[in-house]
Amino acid sequence: MKLIEKKRKDILDAAIREFREQGFPAARVNRIAELAEVSKRTLYKHFESKEVLFQAITDILLEEIAATPKLRYLPGAPLRGQLFSAVQDYVGHLTGEEYMGLNRLVMSELLRDQDLAQAFFARAAMQDGPIQALIAEAMQAGALRQGDPGFAAGQLLSMVKHFLVWPQFLMGAKAGVDADAVIADCIDMVLAHYGPPD
């Protein structure tokens, strides 16, 4: 890693730490520079303001979402099993310590700034998630009835997140439920609704 890239990463890591500890409004650029062990001038060479720095952090979150591998529907394998593995992996990613911390940081600021929230969710909506891609291919193959794959994926993931992601996101503790049983039930509900026509 080149020195300039390392400094940029150090500044971002320091900003994430400062924003987490102080919240965005109270975070200080001086403190971020100190944590990153760079001068304030160097920090401003990379990021012209605290707002631009925060934007770079939201970009990291969106890049993580985009980097999730797209899943292909395998016609020879049961769709239920494919969806189960996909949702398990997705929940594991969302509840990972690093992603969860970054997500909390970004969401807390989006709640405060509606313009920033609209811009963030507009950009996030342009990305097809892995489950949406899998459902789209299953619909094209006739394994599910035709519909809006994004809407169907949203229905499935909203149910799963209610039980397995939001309790951890909001309260810092995993829900006291059997995660595999929850995922299986949610998939069964979606498959019952989107099952192929006879």
Image (cartoon, rainbow, N blue to C red):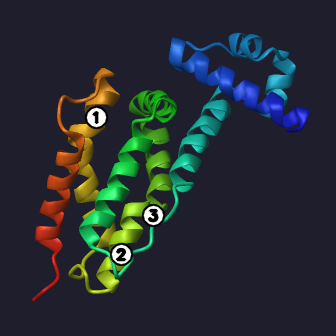
Q: Where residue 184 sits in the image (x, y, percent)?
A: 19, 54
The residues bearing labels 1 and 3 have C-alpha atoms spaced at a distance of 21 Å
> SS class of the residue under badge 2?
helix
The answer to whether marks 2 and 3 mark residues whose Cβ atoms lie closer than 8 Å is yes
Residue ID for mark 3: 128
Using residue 162 as the reference point, say whether residue 86 is left or right of it: right
Residue flagged by tag 3: what amino acid is it? Asp
Q: Residue at x 67, y 25 (%)?
A: 13
Q: Residue at x 53, y 21 (%)?
A: 24
135 above or below 87? below
Q: Residues within 10 Å of mark 1 (few under 14, many from 20)?
A: some
The residues bearing labels 2 and 3 have C-alpha atoms spaced at a distance of 10 Å
Report the front residue among 15 and 178.
178
Residue ID for mark 1: 166
| Comes first in the chain, label 1 or label 3 | 3
Q: Quadrant of residue 16?
A: top right
| Comes first in the chain, label 1 or label 2 | 2
On the question of residue 25 being in view, the answer is no
Using residue 73 as the reference point, say whether residue 33 is left or right of it: right
Residue flagged by tag 1: what amino acid is it? Trp
